[in-house]
Image: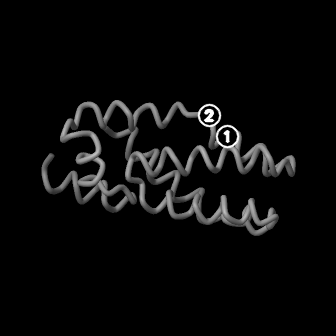
Amino acid sequence: MDISKKEEWKKTGIDIESALDRFMGNESLLNRFLKKFLDDPNYGKLQKAIEEGDAEAAVAASHTLKGLCGNLSMKDLFDLFTRQVALFRSGKFEEAAALMTEIAPAYERITEAIRRI
């Protein structure tokens, strides 16, 4: 992968070197998993759960997203979902929901970058 592409990924919050290490240097495999991230329904489930005030569904979706982001080295999103899950589990639903103002633009940056692969 060329340096400019690595820099582009870095700007979106993906530690591409760590991700490539996790995928044993197989850029094609990493790209396939990144594309699958676009199809994961949990972001929509999280939004719906927050709208409906369903803390149990919200923590499940946020926790799943946290794991996905960790596996794909999406550091910024991973950190945000880690905070959100902790807040949900502490019974601080409103604070957790308020993190969506930070999560939404970070999620959008990453999904847009993945769509350009």
Quadrant in the picture for residue 80: bottom right
Quadrant in the picture for residue 85: bottom right
Above or below, 72 relative to 77: above
Q: Residue furthest right?
A: 53
SS for dot 1: helix
Q: Residue furthest left?
A: 2
Along the line of sight, which residue is nearer the eye, 108 or 70?
70
Percent position (x, y) of residue 17? 23, 54
Residue at screen point 59% across, 44% down: 64
Q: Give me the C-alpha separation between circle 2 and circle 1.
A: 6 Å
| Labelled pair 2, 1 in contact (Cβ < 8 Å) | yes
Q: Which mark is residue 41?
A: 2
Percent position (x, y) of residue 74? 42, 54
Mark 1: few/some/many CA within 10 Å (<14, 14-19, 20+): few
Mark 2: few/some/many CA within 10 Å (<14, 14-19, 20+): few
Above or below, 71 relative to 35: below
Residue at screen point 72% across, 47% down: 47
Above or below, 69 relative to 93: above
Q: Residue furthest front?
A: 90
Question: Which residue is labeled 1 in the image?
Answer: 44
49 to the left or right of 13: right
